[in-house]
Amino acid sequence: MNRRGAFRVKVSDIFWTINTSADVTFTDYKERFDVERETRVANLAFTYRFGKNTVTPNRRRQGGAEEEKRRAGNS
C-alpha cells in the first residue's frame, strides 16, 4: 500500500473494572444498587491517504501591513 494505509486498534476496559454502585439514604428509606454493564469495547479502524504524498509550499503573501511598513520607512 506504499505506506498510505494504516490500521488502528483501540480497546477500552479490558479487565472490566468500570462498575457503578451507589447508596441512597433518606429519612426512613435506604437503597443500594449495583450496575454491571458491558464496558469492554474494541474498535478497529482503517485509514487511507489519497492524492499526492508531497505538497507544494505556500508562497509568502504580503498584506497591506507590509506595504505600510515599507512606505513609513521610505518617508
Image (cartoon, grey):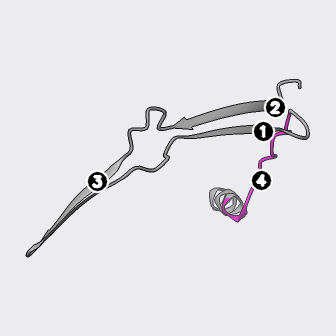
The residue lying toward the viewer, choosing from 7 and 3, is: 7
Question: Residue at image x 39%, y 44%?
Answer: 18
> Which label lies toward us, 4 or 1?
1
**Which residue has dot 1 on it?**
47
Alpha-carbon span between mark 4 and mark 3: 60 Å
Q: Secondary structure at mark 1?
A: strand
Residue 37 highlighted magenta (yes or no): no
Alpha-carbon span between mark 4 and mark 1: 34 Å
Question: Residue at image x 81%, y 40%?
Answer: 57
Alpha-carbon span between mark 3 and mark 1: 39 Å
Q: Residue furthest bottom?
A: 27
Q: Residues within 10 Å of mark 4 (few under 14, many from 20)?
A: few
**Which residue has dot 2 on it?**
5
* Left or right of 27 on screen, residue 52: right
Q: Give the amino acid type for the residue marked by disc 1 in the picture.
A: Thr
> Which label lies toward us, 4 or 2?
2
Instruction: Assess whether mark 1 and mark 2 are in contact (beta carbons under 8 angstroms).
Output: yes
> Which label lies toward us, 4 or 3?
3
Mark identifier at residue 21 = 3
N-terminal label among 2 and 1: 2
Q: Which residues are magenta?
A: 54-65
**Is the C terminus in the top left, top right, bottom left or bottom right quadrant?**
bottom right
> Which label lies toward us, 3 or 1?
3
N-terminal label among 4 and 1: 1
Magenta highlight: main SS: loop
**Which residue has dot 4 on it?**
61
Alpha-carbon span between mark 4 and mark 2: 34 Å
Q: Give the amino acid type for the residue marked by disc 3 in the picture.
A: Ser
Question: Residue at image x 43%, y 38%?
Answer: 16
Question: Residue at image x 36%, y 47%?
Answer: 19
Instruction: Assess whether mark 1 and mark 3 are in contact (beta carbons under 8 angstroms).
Output: no
* Left or right of 17 on screen, residue 9: right
